[in-house]
Amino acid sequence: MQFSLPKSWRTSLARAGVLLGAFGAMAMPVFAEDATTIAEQAKKRLNGEVVAAPASPIYQVSAMQEQVPPPAPGANVGQPDQIFVDPGYAAPAETEEAGPWTLQSVMGSGLADKGIVFGGWADLGYSSNPDLSFTDAGEDDNVNMSQLYMFVKKEADGSKGIDWGFRFDALYGTDGNDAQSFGNPKPTYDNSATFDHGIYEWALPQLYGEIAVGDVSVKMGHFYTIVGYEVVTSPDNFFYSRQLTFWNSEPFTHTGALATWKASDKLTVWGGWTAGWDTGFAQFNGGSNFLGGFNYAATDKLSFIYTTALGDFGARGTGAINSFILSYMITEKLQYVGQYDVLGTNNDVDFQTDGVARDSGGLINYLFYTINDQWKTGARWEWYKPDGVSYYEMTYGVNYKPTQNFVLRPEVRYQWSPGISYEEFIFGVDAIFKF
């Protein structure tokens, strides 16, 4: 099912996108909703949100939401009574005191005393058309369970000496294939036919151990990437749909070792080795690459993140990706985020014929406006150029969050490529319940 917009509509939308892009260039160059690892905390700081440091100085690098056992109610990040609280949606005082409902509060509150936390969410969504991203042909024009997600973890706390931790995540839904280790040779780990059930798939995107001491922590195993702004996990993005750049030119997961050093209150540094892109406890043709970067919070309003992966990516060839993210809080309610990615590889593919990018550039601009505690609006304008052909995408959406456990995200998306006479209008909406 495809829609072709009237020329006057396309012109108006294109002008709006150009204006947004121009504004982004002037301000230069996500609202990542509930993540509490260092990569996502860094992005929260990019969003101008006040993020309190956890009890430990160790920040865990992962795109997943993090939760740690008490100390005290009211801490912004990582406490059980504050699970899923997004500072962009300040909850009423009485709700903050009571805290959101969690599965752990009913079934396993005693585990939190030992530092073990578990939880998850269910994401039910609809997209009218395939979007060259997370919604594939066959998944469109139908209400699907995008993600049924569970995790269990213990966070390593090096503030009192050497400590250990771990994390295990499992996902089932139409997004399962996006979180699988599809960079593995088949059948290896979760890149196996036994994990697939039609348009629904199982995935095990994180399984790692962690050691921490002082301001340094090291995770070893299978984990989400630190590259880019948008992430696999639904609650950690503002929009239901994803960037073209993210889905087509960035890694999702890695297997290897990654160290995090909290150098100061303003600077955090990452560095490590992984066995290529999107691999799970395996290598594809000897994949081996460096993964690293840093986050620098220049001021309360201005922050910058740089991440890179370079070397042998395995199935994606040898090369490098560099990702730059800059955020500026224009006012207390209006925020701009800009991202620029550059990918270059020796992979013998072409995006137009193979659906895999050899080289690409991506410029993504966001504007977010917080209306009140329950409503937030957002716009995303993207220029993505894989292997010499430009694609454009504009998405406008709203987040409605009546409670700390629930968010509704309707959006409209228009994307096109003049060089290949392609255009698509897409309506999407999803509902996330967090537990």
Image: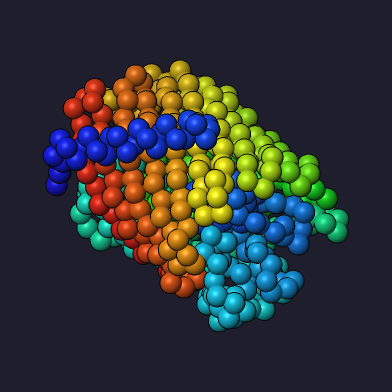
Residue found 53% across the figure and 60% down from its top: 88
Residue found 28% across the figure and 35% down from its top: 14
Which of the colour schemes (rainbow, by chain, secondary structure, one colour) is used?
rainbow
**160 on left or right of 187:** right
Q: Is residue 198 placed above or below 119 in the rendered structure?
A: above
Residue found 55% across the figure and 28% down from its top: 322
Q: Nearer the viewer, residue 283 or 312?
A: 312
**94 on left or right of 54:** left
Residue 20 locus on image (x, y percent):
39, 37
The outermost residue toward the front is: 331
**56 on left or right of 360:** right
Residue 67 locus on image (x, y percent):
62, 64
**Quadrant of residue 11 within the rendered picture:** top left
Residue 176 locus on image (x, y percent):
39, 52
Residue 150 locus on image (x, y percent):
50, 64
Residue found 27% across the figure and 39% down from its top: 13
How many numbered discs sit on the rendered protein? 0
Q: Is residue 182 visible?
A: no
Q: Nearer the viewer, residue 421 or 9?
A: 9
Q: Is residue 158 visible?
A: yes
